[in-house]
Amino acid sequence: MMPPDPETVLGDIDRSLIRGRATRGVAFLVLRYAAIRLLGLAANIVLSRLLSPEAFGIYAITLFLLVLLSFVGDFGLSASLLQQRHAIGDADIRTVFTAQQLLVLSLLVVLFLLAPALASSYHLGGSGTWFIRLMLIAGLFTSLRTAPTIILERQLRYGPLSVIDGVDFGLFQLTAVILAIMGYGVWSFVLAVLLAKLISTLLAYRLAGWMPAFGFDATRFAGLWRFGVPFQLSWLTYYLRDYMIPIAGGLLVTTAQVGYLNWALALAGIPGQLAQIVGRVTLPAFARYQDEPRALARAIEQSIRGLAISATPLHLGIVALAPWLIHLVFSDKWLPALPAVYLLSVHWSGANLTSPLVSALNAMGHVRLALMLSATWATATFALALILLPGLGFVAFALAYSITMIAASIAAVVITRRFVPIRLWPEVRAPLTAAVLACGACFLVRQVLAANLVDLMILILATGAAYAGLLYLFEGRRLQSDFRRVFRRHAV
């Protein structure tokens, strides 16, 4: 087979299909999210019962190195391609691929050599060095997946992307459970990550129809670099904030307390993953509207409305039922994490605003503003956690997350309104009211019942039905219109 012509232009979709395909992209990813989250919830229950908080803490501490390779290695070059107005070519992909792999391999060698010192500093035990090194190899696999992902995201082909993510997540959960049952302890996490990243990366190349190819065009790289550097610095600040628990907590509190915090972050973040899905879809979609403020405003409003409808009742439901969920489902050894679950639910709720708004700022090319926001946010979170730590212990991290998220959400709305005329309250008023009423009733009913699995299931179903009924009562016609827009036939 002949190698691709470096000047080959990768086909962009027709502009008239952008809104429909982006909307269906969210639908694809939400359906994928729902399916794998059911698997993930089942796996997390098993792993929570089989493994110790210390094992969860070690996993969280080593995982941040994998994510570090992904963030630093990309350095915003993929976002540069997604944000461009004009079509991209194979030479652009090769340039990004080559630059990224050189950077990732350089960083990987350095961290490989530092692994013994890192393992000692984070109290990872005798096997800590190899925990770190295997996670770094998994990070290399993740970086190799960037090029085919760019192609699929540029074309808004979220069906194949859903398959890739589903295989990645599902294979990790299944492998981790099997190994935990076999008694592998924290190795269950490490080996599962390694296998899942390898298989999903190979699948990404197959579905994108692109094979690894090296090539470097200095002119193209310079253009991508100008956008990419501030964009990735912005994401680096998000990384430092979002992984502050293992990065700083691993040095300041015990491994078990890191485990409690990371476990609480995962439980509270089950609905919060929806915001990440929307953020992933909206950057390339919003970029097509960057010269049309009103169309962009409408797209932002629809994204936030979708999150308000789907994620808000889940956030409030977890808060209402958290004590029962821990006691009946995950086991009482996780009860010390309950205060963190409440506080981190506030943090994840705010992501329903910040994720699409920051995507909009980046899509419009205001990456330096996004960088300033995220850098201030990360610094404030870290400083506040350090201030609160002596008095509150490990819960200080969760409180810092919640306080700074509230401030960041307000700031993101104010900044975005400088460029696009968004009106958010009409979009979120009905779902927020319905969720507060339904989940508030659930909380009150739980106070008078004895904790048991049957009543837990009844409360979950009743709360869901009450929310759906109230939402339909408040704006049934609009919901029907939203549903038709998502699934209309011509949005291919």
Image (cartoon, rainbow, N blue to C red):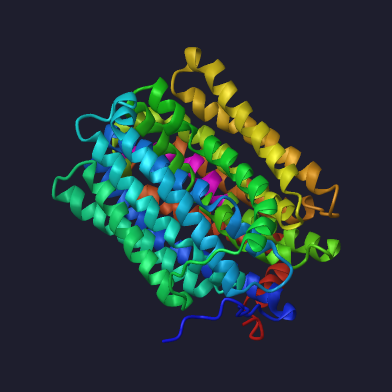
| Residue sitting farthest toward the top | 390
Residue at 80% from the left image edge and 59% from the top image edge: 297
Where 366 sits versus 401, above or below? below
Q: Main secondary structure of the magenta part?
A: helix
Residue at 64% from the left image edge and 52% from the top image edge: 228
Where 95 sits versus 110, above or below? below
Is 477 on the left-hand or right-hand side of 135?
A: right
Q: Is residue 323 magenta?
A: yes
Is any part of residue 356 visible from this angle? no
Q: Is residue 14 magenta?
A: no
Q: Quadrant of residue 479?
A: bottom right
Residue at 74% from the left image edge and 63% from the top image edge: 299
Is 321 on the left-hand or right-hand side of 478?
A: left
Where 486 sits versus 83, above or below? below
Is 79 on the left-hand or right-hand side of 420?
A: left
Pick the residue in front: 128 or 307: 128
Residue at 46% from the left image edge and 70% from the top image edge: 213
Q: Which residues are magenta?
A: 313-327
Pick the residue in front: 392 or 56: 56
Pick the residue in front: 457 or 46: 46
